[in-house]
Image (cartoon, coloured by chain):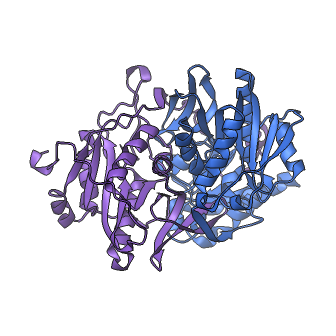
Chain colours: A purple, B blue
Amino acid sequence: MSPCFLPVQNKQVKETINKQVEPSIINSMKILVCISVVPDTTTKIKLTEGNASIDIAGIQWVINPWDELSLTRALELKDDASNGINSVTVIHVGTTVSEPVIRKALAIGADDAIRVDAEPVDAYFTAAQIAEVVKKENFDIILCGIESSDFNGSTVGGMIAEFLEIPSVSAVSDIRFVEGKPALVREIDGGRENITVSVPFAAIVQKGIAKEPKIAAMRGIMMARTKPIKLYQPSAVEPLTEVVMYEKPAPKAACKFVDADAPRQLITLLQNEAKII
Amino acid sequence: MSILVFTENWEGKFKKLSYELVSWAAAVAKMNGSTVTALSIGNVDDAELKSLGGYGADKIINIKNDALLTLDNNAYANAIASTAVDTDAKIVVLSNNNTGKAIAPHLSVRLKAGLGADVSKLPVSLNPFTVYKRAYSGNAFAHLTIKSDIKIVTLARNSFDIVSTSNNAVVENKTVDIDGSQVRTVVNSVEKQSGKLLLTDADIVVSGGRGMKSPDNWAPLVELADLIGGATACSRPVSDEGWRPHSEHTGQTGKIIAPNLYIAVGISGATQHIAGISASKYIVAINSDKDAPIFETAQYGIVGDAAKVLPKLVEAVREVKR
């Protein structure tokens, strides 16, 4: 890729004044969407020699599907002027490898992007990095996907909230504004709850938050080339966990087929062999 | 030293996952010589609380507080963190369900405790404390070492067998002071099903895909589920088409489930669907295409048209039941 695609500010952004945002300044809210970069969901995962890590050769990197949906919802909220959303920023903790994916988020419609230049070694480390940036840039709403399709943690969003001492709401399937106040739907076992929450807050979003991920249009792709990606150097944070090795799932025995005209045989297998019914 | 288990209830009765959590904690306690404390928050009666002893809890701490009737992540994390400190807990276990996923990250930061999420099986080792967890949506498993003094684990549903024992557990009521400023989420209204089997709690799930061809063909599928005590589910195209409610969608972006038996009818088995069901103990596939990828994941298969196979299967189950 040509360097002119990446107008990255290769120096640490100066600290801005840490001003307290009053929830009443409802007309200038800033949304931060946390983006995790993951292998395309159809990737066949292979391990490296010694199973120490995932073999990244040939992997197509994409925005984590839930993060893509949360970005879509953030942009929908901004599109409705009555919601008073001023800007939608995406943030990612990762190396230069992720830049094309961040650029894609900008092409989809984010106003600007922040990258913390570090390997996201564990959830605690990653959340701490994002929280440090939020302390400087004061976002009102922080959106995270309910899990990343790589580490399946569902952890970064709640950790950011705790670092910032703001509320979080998890399993959120809808966010809207009713009379200027955020109204959220939270999925619970066997149902859903309608919730209001004070601003600033973090929402960990899941299915339902947006219908389909927004696709980048040609105009968006052109505009994304000149949108800024701010670069932050990482803060010193000690990770609390470490992946020491990976395993592939145990190979499975071949499927036993039962004749379509004799389904009774299936019942027998489930009763006598699997012993589950 | 103790292991603290957050046990969740559904309308006053412990969820099955709570017994799994206590069983897991009891097995770990046996390995490292510690005790098991269960923490219950909500309106659960004494007999029900004591039932946790039957799965290995030594002590049950019961918190009943009107401010905790609905889930506020910060307030719950406060209650659990303070209990963890009181009981000198070195391991805190929650379920990897929506509630556990909501609270565990807060606890992790508050206790500066590393978090292993979506863990199955017993720890690979105790020192260092290494757990076995799902990664890459079930396409790999990671051995994750938690290096902090206190460790937090969220246990995948249906990943650990419930073990009955005969501990005579003591119940201790604990009061927590919660001032209004702690609770910052307000639940205004709830829409909740009742009396129906929860999809995420079900041992048996019968699920339909596009191969069902029309929403009008669901009757035998529902009948089969009823006969074998299962819940019904569906694939994404089916809920997108509005044939079945979204709450039934299982798959990577829908519900991730782990029943003992998953019967996939007319579901081809796209990677995204498999990601939501791969933790099932047994998978049965019924599909007209013998090359459908679902058969690579299934233990038992029938090649045939759903509309023809289902009624025969229902009849076979009825016969067996007679």
Point out residue B121 in the picture as x, y percentages from the top left corner: 64, 31
Q: Which residue shows up at 87% across the image and 33% down it?
A: B167
B250 up-or-down from A23: above or below: above
Q: On the picture, is A61 further left or further right than A219?
A: right
Point out residue B302 in the picture as x, y percentages from the top left corner: 62, 49
Q: Nearer the viewer, residue B302 or A110?
A: A110
Can residue B248 be seen from the camera position used here? no
A260 up-or-down from B188: above or below: above
Point out residue A9 in the picture as x, y percentages from the top left corner: 16, 47
Q: Which of B179 and B195 is in front in this view?
A: B179
Q: On the picture, is B132 further left or further right than A17?
A: right
Q: On the picture, is B150 further left or further right than B319?
A: left
Q: Quadrant of residue A195?
A: bottom right
Point out residue B138 in the picture as x, y percentages from the top left corner: 51, 40
Q: In which quarter of the image is residue A25?
A: bottom left
Q: Nearer the viewer, residue B183 or A78?
A: B183
Can residue B215 be seen from the camera position used here? yes
Q: In which quarter of the image is residue A256?
A: top right
Q: Which residue shows up at 50% across the image and 48% down it?
A: A162
Q: How many marks?
A: 0
Dividing the image into 4 quarters, which one contains the C terminus of chain B? bottom right
Dividing the image into 4 quarters, which one contains the N terminus of chain B? top right
